[in-house]
Structure formats: structure tokens, C-alpha cells
Amino acid sequence: MTEVEKKNMSTGKKAVIAIAVIIILIAGYFALNFYRLYFSPNVTENQKYLYIKTNQSYDELIFELEKRDMLNSTSSFAKAAGKMNLPTSFKPGRYRLKKGMTNRTLINLIKAGNQEPVKLKFQNIRKKENFAAYLASNLEADSLSFINALDSSALISKYGFNEDNIYTMFIPNTYEMYWNTSPADFLERMHKEYDRFWTTERKQKAASLNLKPAQVYTLASIVDAEALYDKEMPIIAGLYLNRLNKGILLQADPTVIFANNDFTVKRVTGKLLQVQSPYNTYKYAGLPPGPIMMPSINAIDAVLNRNENNYIYMCAKEDFSGYHNFAETKAEHEINAKKYRDALNKKNIFR
């Protein structure tokens, strides 16, 4: 082989090596960009959740990500999202963000609609508007949308309820559901929970008391409002059932407080008793048209398993322990009531 041939071969090898190096550099460049685009950590720790509203546009989603500083690089996310068809396939919901999450992981999460459920825990809520406000603070729909659903005769009548007793459909407990659950879907879910709660055994116990489930719930709301301690609930339930069965006015102070819509009252006085309301059980016989609060499950079961007693009267104990003195006769009750009135006067509690 001549020197010229050797020189040409050496030049050729160098060219091949140079081309190979260039190819490797180009491949490395694209591989690095590919990694940065899809697999590099991009989610910050600035926000715990990403909320995508129903009917929100893709541009609004990108704006939200940037405005709330959820990403280190919004542009890389947008580029990856375009290549993964996110603009036409994202789903509304509440998505849990984790620091260091990649674009690919977040995009797949949103495309699949893999939300983290919201935990709703409700009990002792008095008014529908308070309940609507609680739901709106945890779910996507606003309080007005929930109020409209709760007041919609067409919507709630299909479940067998009206505007006065729709509250009795909500069994206080802890529930998991998606953030973008609509008011109508929320009612549907709650009705399923209602049917699950009212077992054949519970319905039979209610029937044995000559009460419907909604009436049990309403009475339980009064019992729960009266009882500071759960162990007194069956006794109080028995007392009120005695009054109902004898046709005696319930004369339950919590119903008067509810009727006056003043929950700061500590002492029910003559003026408060004059309120014209079907919830004033000092004026109107029987149960009020609906519950005065969401009772606990313990209170509902206390009514169904009421203590069989002969009590007709009750009065808070004068030691302010939260317990009650019970009585079968008016004379006994007057003695107990005087003790309590004197204790209130001594503490200058007049309303």
C-alpha cells in the first residue's frame, strides 16, 4: 500500500469517526431534550392540588399552572402536552401534585382523570344554607347551585322528599367523592347512602314506633340538640315519644331556638316562645316539618332503640354538668325547673 493510499485511508477513518461523533452528539442532544421534556422533574411544591374546572379551556389550564407557579417550566409542559394530545383529552377534577413529578406523569394523570377524592364529613349542621356553604367549600359547584338543588321540587321529589324534609336524606358520616361531583350527582349518591343506612331492621324499628324514617330523623335532631352526652339520648328519646303518644306538646327548647334563628340563646324566655313557626313545638303539636339539625347516627339509633320510661318532663341539672333531671309528674318537674332557674339567675343568664 502506497503512502498516498495510507493517507487516504487515515483521512477516511477520521471522517467516519467525526461523523460518528456528530451523530452521537446529535442523538445525545435529542435524547437529553426528550428526557427534559418528558422525564425531568418539573412540578414544584408551591401548590398541593391542581383544580381543573368543568368546561375549563386548555389555555385556561396552562394559565392556571403558570399563575400559581406549579411548574418549573410551563413551556416544556405545554410542549409535552401538545405532543401527548392533552389539549383535546384533559379531564376536570382535583389532582394531587407531588414535588418532582414529571410532565409525562402529570399529563397522564390529567388525561386519565385520576383524581384524589375529597373527604366530606358532616354532622350537626343546622340550616340548608350552612350545608350548601360547606359543600361549596369542598366541591366545585358554588353554594347557590347546591341550594337550588336542595330546593328543587322536581329534583328532590323523585327521592320521595320535599323542601322541608330533604335534610333527612343526608346521613351524617364521612364520604369520599370527586371534587367535580355535580349537585344532582351528589343527591343521587346521598340517596344511595340513605337506602344503605335504612336497613330492614331499622325500618322495622321505626314502624314499631309508628314513625317513618324521616320522622325518626327529625326527632333524632331534637334529641341530639338536647343531649350533651350520648348515654342520655335513649332516655330523652323515650321521653319525647311518650309526649308524642299522649298528644302532649313536645315543648323542646332547641326547636324554639331554631324557629327564632338565634343560636346564641342560652335561656328560652317567654318572648322567644311567641314566635309563629311550625318549628315552635310550644305552639304546634307533634313533630316539626323537618329536622332542626343533622343528628348523629347515635342519635338516630337512640330513637330507634329508645329507653322505655314514663318520663314526660326534663330539665337541665342545676350544676351545669350537661346532664338532665327527668320527671314523670308536673310537680316533680317544677321542683327541678326551679333549681335550674335559680342557678341561671345566680349566674346572671337571662337569655
Image: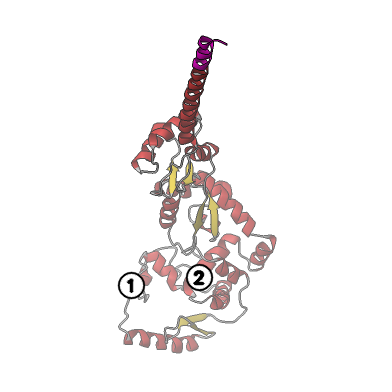
Q: Is residue 238 above or below residue 136?
A: below
Task: Tell me where the magenta segment starts and ends, as one range.
Answer: 1-12
- Quarter of the figure with the N terminus: top right
In the image: residue 74, left or right of residue 7: left
Cα separation between marks 2 and 1: 24 Å
Residue type pointed to by label 1:
Lys
Name the residue rendered at 52%, 48% in the picture. Answer: 116
Q: Residues within 10 Å of mark 2 (few under 14, many from 20)?
A: many
Residue 290 sits above or below residue 76 on the image: below
Q: Quadrant of residue 277?
A: bottom left
Secondary structure category for the residue under label 1: loop
Residue for badge 2? 224
* Mark 2 secondary-structure assignment: helix
Who is closer to the viewer here, 139 or 73?
73
Is disc 2 in contact with disc 1, using a CB cutoff of under 8 Å? no
| Residue 79 in picture, x, y percent from top left | 43, 30
Residue 320 lies in quadrant: bottom left
Where is residue 321 shown, x and y percent of the image?
45, 83
Q: Position of residue 160 (x, y in %)?
A: 58, 51
Which is closer to the viewer, label 2 or label 1?
A: 2
Q: Amino acid at mark 2?
A: Asp
